Image (spheres, grey):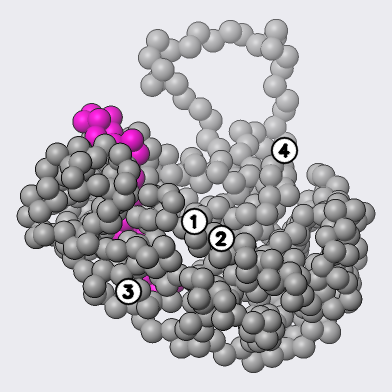
Amino acid sequence: MRRAGATSLLLLALVTLPVRAQTAGPGDAAAPPAQATAAVAPPADPRALTYPPLTISFPKPERLMLSNGLVIYLFVDHELPLIDLAFDLAAGSIDDPPGKEGLADLTAALMRAGGTADMSPDQVDEAVDFLPARLGFAPDRDNLGGTLSALKEKFPEALRLFAGMLRAPRFDPARLEVERARVVEEIRRRWDDPGDVAELNFRLLAYGARSPWARLPDAASIGRITRDDLVDFHRRYLHANNMVLGVAGDFEPEAMKSLLKSTFGSWPRAKVTPPPIGKVKDAVPVGVHLIERPVSQSTFEIGHLGVNRFDPDKFPLKILNFILGEGGFTSRLVREVRSTRGLAYSVGGGVGMDSDRGLFEVSCRTRAASTVEAIQLIRDILRRLRQDGPTEEEVREAQEASINSFVFSLDGTVPYMRAYLYYDRYGYPPDYLMTYRDNLGRVTRAQVFVAARRHIDPEHLLILVVGKAQDLASPLDSLGLGAPRLVRLDGEAAASN
């Protein structure tokens, strides 16, 4: 497969299948030269254009499990002299102890920046620059990932360096203070962007300020974190049997197996016992909330809780989201709120999925004077979609666009590996990627209609507005949801009561 973006270190927020699009099989005859091909006049109506169907090749990785429980997938691709490694591990910010929010993030940062047992931080930085190689660690709420990319001939050396960071980080105290200062400065600037203010506080309101799915670090929690805390987090979760690892690129399988076994085989297995995480409670504070900010525009979020990543309506919801707000200019929100009425600079959203409950969330940025009108229009759009459902044409167009974007959104062995690891880590069915397009194609209008009625409730919405109340053309209580509740920011956290 073509290695487009082969050295990318980031997995997209929505992971889809990387594939190679082809219009001819390997045994097909080559097309004749252009001058020997009879000219075909294009149709008068562009909508009458036809194209041959795309075919998809699914790389089949070789699976290897070491005696310590480490699961490895090998993806051979000799197209470019590059090798990439990635892993996903079951740990993240939801595992931060209360009062020490930010621990997972600091641990991941210091694994890269804090040196190894055998090398100082400066020595590690110099080695990475000299190789050259790109590597890093990135935590999420319930996942910690890592990536490494290097030239083929430099990969063994880069792997030894990466393994030192992964297995035996030094957590240099001086570098910890540097990272601590950096994080505190980020926290100080957290409320500078109205979009961040709206998004983060919407999560806090929807999940509850104490929920591990929403809570935020502050300067006090970062200040409580010690080097011993980093060591303890690493000891609890960074183990071979708690992760899945993949290698993609230009290598010989047997030689790579030997290298990986010698690098990770002595890593002892350990029992991993994460703290208990309570189920998300559906106690969303329905109604209007306001965060007063000295800005000339309003940013607002509308929604409630979403669904689990394995919800039976998963594929109907993907089509529903495209129709509602994720389909660009063809979506109802963009078409009606932005294009037809001119009430938004940006608008979009849909029903989100997560390990417990995602969020149904519509985001909008508009003129202050248009705030109430835009909110009311979005509520009307949600009501109509839930009451009447989508049209057959909307479902058909959403399916075609989603299936085609699935083919082209990620192309290359490395992006495919990242997607494969992601779904393996979260326990998706083994054939999830191979059956993805078929599952989208089987969705019916009736299923999308049912999903809309089950998972969108226009009469029980949390509405959070960030802006200046005095600049609104109509007061927020004209929405008929009672007086807005003021959400106060102290520069580090927010609370509604």
Amino acid on which the number 2 mark rests in the picture: Glu
Numbered tag placed on residue 208 in the rendering: 3
Mark 4–mark 3 Cα distance, whole angstroms, equals 56 Å
Q: CA distance from mark 4 to mark 1?
A: 55 Å
**Secondary-structure class at tag 3:** loop
Separation of residues labelled 3 and 2 (CA atoms): 25 Å
Q: Earlier in the sequence, mark 4 or mark 1?
A: 4
For the residues bearing labels 4 and 2, Cβ distance under 8 angstroms: no
**Disc nearer the start of the sequence (4/3):** 4
**Residue drawn at point x = 54 percent, y = 86 percent:** 274
Looking at the rendered structure, the secondary structure element under dot 1 is loop
Q: Is residue 345 left or right of residue 473?
A: right
What residue did someone put label 2 on?
A: 185
Residue 348 part of the magenta-drawn span: yes
Work out whether residue 395 can be spotted: no
Name the mark on residue 26: 4
Q: Are marks 2 and 1 in contact (CB under 8 Å)?
A: yes
Callout 4–callout 3 Cβ contact below 8 Å: no
Report if residue 236 is visible in the image.
yes
Range covered by the magenta-colored residues: 337-361
Query: Tag 3: Cα neighbours inside 10 Å, few (<14), some, or many (≥20)?
Result: many
Determine which quarter of the picture holds residue 158: bottom right
In front: 409, or 497? Answer: 497
Q: CA distance from mark 1 to mark 3?
A: 22 Å
Q: Is residue 469 left or right of residue 347?
A: left
Is 468 located above or below residue 304 in the figure? above
> Callout 4: helix, strand or loop?
loop
Which one is closest to the eye, mark 4 or mark 2?
2
Mark 1 or 3, closer to the camera: 1
What percent of the width, then of the height, locates residue 255? 90, 66
Lower position in the chain sequence, tag 1 or tag 3: 1
